[in-house]
Image: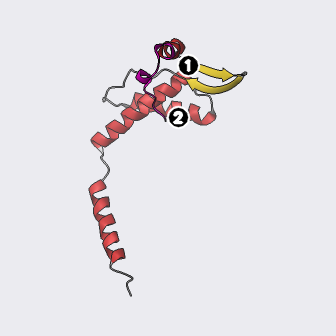
Amino acid sequence: MNHVNLNAYDEAIKRFILSLLPDSSGSVLEIDGQPVARVTPVMTAEVTDDWDAAKDARRCELIDREITGTLTTEEAAELRVLQSAMLRHRRRVAPLPLDEARRLHQELLTKAASGPTG
């Protein structure tokens, strides 16, 4: 996703962009009747780190809706927040064993550099 810093733009452009945000479902920008961009507000409410079965069930429900193509814009924003919270929780309670993977990777690189084995 491309991040655009609006501070570098004229005040009229900032006001225009901000005028699109009050609708929580977002806005579609069109040229000659053809959609060219969608602007959706960023969901700022964060889920706390107290991850539980209810939040996971809601996340799974939203994933199912995304797969079936019935996810609304608000639900997509909620899913992003829930997904981020789940990943934070997983990193806290079950971090990936990256140190061992890095050690194995280095061992394989060393073996590959020493040439073919016979």
Question: Could you say which is closer to the camera, residue 6 or residue 20?
Answer: 6
Give the residue displayed 56% in from the left and 19% down from the top.
26
Question: Could you say which is closer to the camera, residue 50 or residue 111?
Answer: 111
- State which quarter of the image contains the C terminus: bottom left
Report whether residue 72 is seen. no
Q: Name which quarter of the figure residue 71 lies in.
A: top right
Q: Which mark is residue 63?
A: 2
Give the residue displayed 31% in from the left and 30% down from the top.
49
The type of residue carrying mark 2 is: Ile
Residue corresponding to mark 1: 26
Q: Residue 24's x, y, as percent?
A: 52, 16
SS at mark 2? Answer: helix
Give the residue displayed 34% in from the left and 75% down from the top.
113
Rendered position, 92 above or below 117 = above
Report whether residue 30 is seen. yes
SS at mark 1? Answer: loop
Magenta segment, which residues? 1-13
The verdict on residue 5 being magenta is yes
Name the side, left or right, on which 69 lies relative to 115: right
Question: Could you say which is closer to the camera, residue 44 or residue 83?
Answer: 44
Rendered position, 114 above or below 78 = below
Marks 2 and 1, how far apart in space?
Answer: 20 Å
Rendered position, 26 above or below 105 = above
Q: Residue 9's x, y, as percent?
A: 46, 21
The verdict on residue 11 being magenta is yes
The type of residue carrying mark 1 is: Gly
Q: Residues within 10 Å of mark 2 (few under 14, many from 20)?
A: some
Q: Residue 43's x, y, as percent?
A: 44, 22
